[in-house]
């Protein structure tokens, strides 16, 4: 009787099945579904963890500080809530308005020539030149150079009394240009530093995008009699439109956060951005209020205001991109 029960359900040849049991198949199925649906979230989890610690928490904490009168020079002030008074003072702060104008002015003066030069350099590097690998590596040298080293060099170039640029301009001008005491001159000097530092980086981005354009398009245009300028304008530029939009957005956000170049170009050592705040940017003004003056609450309000301005400009760029794409379709 026991033998019949033990052999019940066995194959005719008396051998047991060697495949996985139904329970094992169900377990493997669950693992497979988890691997397909859950593993992508595990891959990106470290980023969100780091962002929560070093991005989201400081953002929220800064928002809290911006509603206080916290100053290390006033013990117990971190617990004094002032509501939105810091933002109200910011709206009537002439120095903040000046810093905002300087930021947009330097951003325009530096971003437009920078991207145009990068586009031209990338177009030249896209030709079959001798030693083009060396040339492509060379355009990246300014980007990998320390900003502090760049500032030391440009401080000598734009010096008022013994500067290299004023030496060349001396035959054409009666008095040397004070590059730090004049608003437009200081904008040009700081923008030159930014252009020199970032043009090569954007040129490589444009070059990588140009190499994805089919060469047959240029051959067909050449057969039809199109010049190189016509090929560049009617083939290269339309093909690079998404890349150009990307670099414009990134460069705009970078211009709003400009700090290192004006900070190192300033010789007053008090973060004024020149004797009369000629080239003081918003971030430089934030640094002055937060660290130099010890106004933590007011500095946090400046940081959040700049964050809101950056988000608004990014949204405007996003809407423009959508409109351009819909027009192309």
Image (cartoon, rainbow, N blue to C red):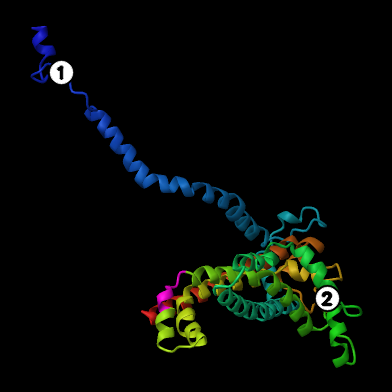
Q: Is residue 156 left or right of residue 206?
A: right
The span shown in magenta is 212-217
Identify the residue at image location x=52%, y=75%.
244
Residue assigned mark 1: 15
User: Where the C terminus falls, by quadrant?
Assistant: bottom left
Identify the residue at image location x=30%, y=33%.
27
Q: Is residue 4 left or right of residue 245?
A: left
User: Callout 2: helix, strand or loop?
Assistant: helix
User: Callout 1: helix, strand or loop?
Assistant: loop
| Tag 1 near tag 2, CB within 8 Å | no
Q: Which mark is residue 293?
A: none
Q: x and y percent of residue 6 in the render? A: 13, 12
Q: Is residue 11 covered in magenta?
A: no
User: Where the N terminus falls, by quadrant?
Assistant: top left
**Picture quarter containing residue 136?**
bottom right
Residue assigned mark 2: 157
Residue 308 visible in this rendered orientation of the protein: no
Other residues around mark 1 within 10 Å, as few (<14) / some (14–19) / many (≥20)? few
Identify the residue at image location x=81%, y=84%.
182
Q: x and y percent of residue 75 in the render? A: 80, 53
Which callout, 1 or 2, points at the residue further toward the start of the chain?
1
Other residues around mark 2 within 10 Å, as few (<14) / some (14–19) / many (≥20)? some
The front one of 63 and 21 is: 21
Q: Is residue 325 left or right of residue 56?
A: left
Residue 171 drawn above or below residue 67: below
Q: CA distance from mark 1 to mark 2?
A: 90 Å
Q: Is residue 220 left or right of residue 305?
A: left
């Amino acid at each position: 009787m026991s033998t019949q029960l033990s052999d019940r359900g066995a194959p005719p040849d008396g051998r047991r099945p060697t495949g996985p049991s139904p329970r094992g198949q169900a377990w493997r199925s669950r693992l497979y579904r988890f691997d397909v649906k859950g593993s992508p979230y595990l891959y990106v989890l470290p980023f969100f963890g780091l962002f929560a610690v070093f991005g989201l928490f400081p953002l929220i904490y800064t928002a809290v500080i911006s509603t206080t009168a916290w100053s290390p020079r006033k013990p117990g002030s971190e617990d004094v809530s002032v509501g939105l008074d810091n933002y109200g003072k910011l709206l009537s702060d002439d120095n903040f308005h000046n810093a905002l104008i300087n930021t947009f002015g330097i951003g325009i003066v530096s971003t437009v020539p920078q991207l145009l030069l990068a586009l031209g350099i990338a177009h030249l590097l896209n030709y079959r030149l001798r030693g083009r690998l060396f040339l492509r590596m060379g355009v990246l040298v300014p980007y990998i150079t320390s900003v502090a080293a760049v500032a030391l060099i440009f401080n000598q170039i734009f010096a008022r009394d013994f500067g290299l640029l004023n030496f060349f301009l001396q035959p054409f001008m009666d008095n040397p240009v004070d590059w730090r005491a004049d608003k437009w001159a200081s904008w040009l000097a700081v923008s030159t530093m930014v252009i020199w530092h970032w043009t090569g980086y954007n040129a490589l981005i444009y070059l990588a995008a140009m190499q994805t354009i089919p060469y047959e398009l240029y051959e067909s245009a050449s057969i039809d009699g199109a010049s190189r300028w016509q090929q560049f304008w009617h083939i290269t530029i339309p093909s690079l439109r998404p890349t150009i939009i990307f670099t414009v957005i990134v460069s705009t956000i970078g211009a709003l956060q400009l700090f290192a170049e004006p900070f190192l170009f300033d010789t007053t050592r008090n973060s004024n951005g020149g004797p009369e705040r000629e080239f003081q940017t918003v971030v430089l003004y934030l640094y002055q209020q937060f660290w130099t003056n010890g106004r933590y609450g007011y500095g946090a309000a400046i940081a959040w205001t700049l964050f809101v301005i950056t988000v608004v400009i990014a949204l405007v760029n996003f809407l423009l991109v959508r409109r351009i794409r819909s027009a192309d379709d």
